[in-house]
Image (tube, helix red, strand yellow):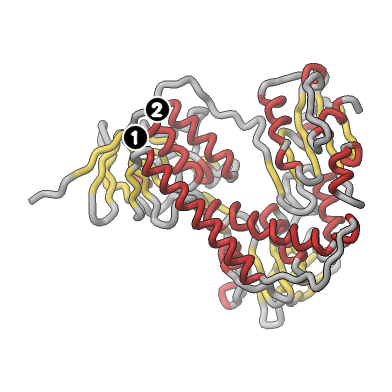
């Protein structure tokens, strides 16, 4: 009795934002799809990244609002938090959303295999994959295997206990103190979370400023805001060793040792795609990721790659759009991937939302631009909801009045940055964009106010 081989139009490797989006879009287009995910559907973003951190951060935001209620004429006594209940709610939200994705896969007749697939062999017509018990064949393959946390080779680290974002999100307690190695987006969001709940937070960053490639002015504003709240920052500082005494760092002040109850590693992520038989395809790479063209095709025919595995953007919304482009190409639709207007958000309080080029990028490329900038206090809604708060909105515009970049610090910037993205992506001059009627009062009006600055 020989083993039955199941045939599909597309095999999707990985069930994160790129994978489940690709599977749903392809199935909607009439293609038969098998999706392999050895862990939970939703990938890192839903299970140990975007969604759980934002759930926790929302509780932190509410807690701070209760504490600051007197500013708004609201008073209360014995304001407290129960982090175990906050963590339990996070788990409930994640499970609910994972179930939602599973339901969508079922609705579109996507075959979901809760195991890791291994590419066994290829020929001119199809790819043969195995999950160790069954065999599958597919005419096309979309690699959406994501990324993994980088653990730097710091001397002594192998003998020291530390957290990555996974362990931090799994914890049901707030530590008394935490040392965060890395002041990027993930590091700063955890810094905001722990600081809000009274933890003693220290951030170590090797670069001259937090948030790496972000707009330098917004990054500095955020750092200064959290410094006022008690977060300690060590910039231009390198971790040189983990010792019994603590974490040894080196900077312009020399070498010193820092101690804390917990240590959180947050120095970035790297594409993950080795060990499942893809090596036999000899895919061309770009940096540490898989190289793709504007249709998300790899160097091997009928193989696409989307999401973190390409090593380019490492954002869930980018991954989902890349998946749409890949599937549209498979379906014969005219579509290409553009990275000109990818929004980036830091979910601290205040929020940072950015899109397009930074001033540093424009200066380095010799591109002429002018800056239109206003305080967030030009928005009546912002003033009404942010007593004593501030921030700014900055538009970078070229000589023809086209938007090159937008950088905002002030909650809820994440909810309207997409409007700027549409203007950049559709090349709408600000003289035309400013004719748009924005609802009043909204914080989004700051975009229009800026155009007249």
Which corner quadrant of the image does residue 402 belong to? top right
Whole-angstrom CA distance, mark 1 to mark 2, is 9 Å
Which corner quadrant of the image does residue 425 belong to? top right
Q: Determine if residue 97 is in view.
A: yes
Above or below — where is 43 with respect to 155? above
Q: Indicate the position of residue 422 as horizontal and vertical percent values.
A: 68, 27
Q: Residue at x 66, y 55 (%)?
A: 186
Q: Determine if residue 151 is in view.
A: no
Residue tagged 1: 140
Pick the residue in front: 77 or 139: 77
Q: Are marks 1 and 2 in contact (CB under 8 Å)?
A: yes
Q: Where is the C terminus found, in terms of image quarters?
A: top right
Above or below — where is 47 with respect to 333? below
Which corner quadrant of the image does residue 227 belong to? bottom right
Mark 2 burial class by Cα count in 10 Å: few <14, some 14-19, many 20+ = many
Pick the residue in front: 438 or 287: 438
Instruction: Give the total of numbered labels.
Output: 2
- Specify the label residue 330 is tagged with: 2
In this picture, residue 81 sits left or right of residue 321: right
Asked which secondary structure carries label 2, the reply is helix
The disc, 1 or 2, on the residue closer to the chain's N-terminal end is 1
Q: Residue at x 80, y 49 (%)?
A: 219
Q: Residue at x 79, y 23 (%)?
A: 437
Above or below — where is 225 with respect to 105? below
Q: Indicate the position of residue 391 as horizontal and vertical percent values.
A: 86, 45
In this picture, residue 430 sits left or right of residue 304: right
- Specify the label residue 264 is tagged with: none
């Amino acid at each position: 009795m020989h083993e039955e081989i199941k045939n599909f139009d597309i095999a999707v490797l990985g069930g994160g934002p790129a994978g489940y989006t690709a599977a749903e879009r392809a199935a909607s287009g009439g293609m038969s799809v098998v999706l392999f995910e050895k862990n939970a559907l939703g990938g890192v973003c839903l299970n140990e990244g975007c969604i759980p951190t934002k759930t926790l951060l929302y509780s932190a935001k509410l807690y701070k609002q209760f504490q600051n209620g007197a500013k708004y004429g609201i008073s209360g006594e014995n304001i407290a938090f129960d982090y175990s209940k906050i963590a339990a709610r996070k788990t409930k939200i994640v499970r609910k959303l994972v179930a939602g994705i599973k339901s969508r896969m079922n609705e579109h007749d996507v075959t979901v295999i809760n195991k890791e697939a291994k590419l066994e062999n290829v020929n001119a017509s199809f790819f043969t994959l195995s999950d160790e018990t069954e065999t599958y064949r597919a005419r096309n393959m979309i690699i959406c295997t994501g990324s993994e946390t980088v653990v730097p080779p710091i001397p002594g680290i192998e003998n020291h206990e530390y957290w990555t974002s996974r362990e931090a999100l799994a914890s049901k307690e707030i530590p008394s103190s935490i040392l965060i190695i890395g002041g990027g987006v993930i590091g700063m969001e955890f810094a905001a979370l722990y600081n809000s709940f009274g933890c003693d937070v220290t951030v170590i960053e090797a670069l001259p400023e937090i948030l790496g490639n972000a707009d330098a002015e917004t990054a500095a504003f955020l750092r200064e805001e959290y410094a006022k709240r008690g977060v300690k920052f060590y910039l231009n500082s390198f971790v040189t060793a983990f010792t019994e005494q603590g974490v040894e760092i080196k900077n312009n002040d020399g070498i010193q040792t820092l101690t804390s109850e917990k240590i959180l590693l947050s120095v970035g992520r790297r594409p993950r795609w080795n060990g499942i038989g893809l090596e036999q395809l000899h895919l061309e790479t770009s940096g540490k990721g898989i190289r793709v063209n504007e249709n998300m095709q790899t160097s091997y025919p009928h193989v696409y790659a989307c999401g973190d595995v390409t090593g380019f953007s490492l954002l869930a919304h980018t991954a989902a759009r890349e998946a749409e482009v890949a599937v549209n190409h498979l379906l014969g639709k005219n579509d290409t991937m553009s990275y000109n207007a990818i929004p980036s958000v830091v979910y601290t309080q205040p929020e940072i939302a950015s899109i397009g080029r930074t001033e540093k990028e424009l200066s380095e490329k010799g591109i002429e631009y002018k800056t239109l900038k206003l305080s967030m206090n030009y928005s009546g809604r912002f003033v009404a909801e942010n007593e004593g708060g501030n921030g700014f909105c900055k538009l970078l515009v070229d000589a023809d009045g086209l938007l090159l970049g937008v950088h905002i610090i002030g909650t809820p910037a994440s909810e309207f940055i997409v409007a700027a993205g549409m203007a950049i992506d559709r090349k709408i001059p600000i003289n035309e964009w400013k004719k748009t009627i924005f609802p009043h009062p909204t914080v989004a009006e700051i975009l229009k106010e800026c155009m007249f600055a």
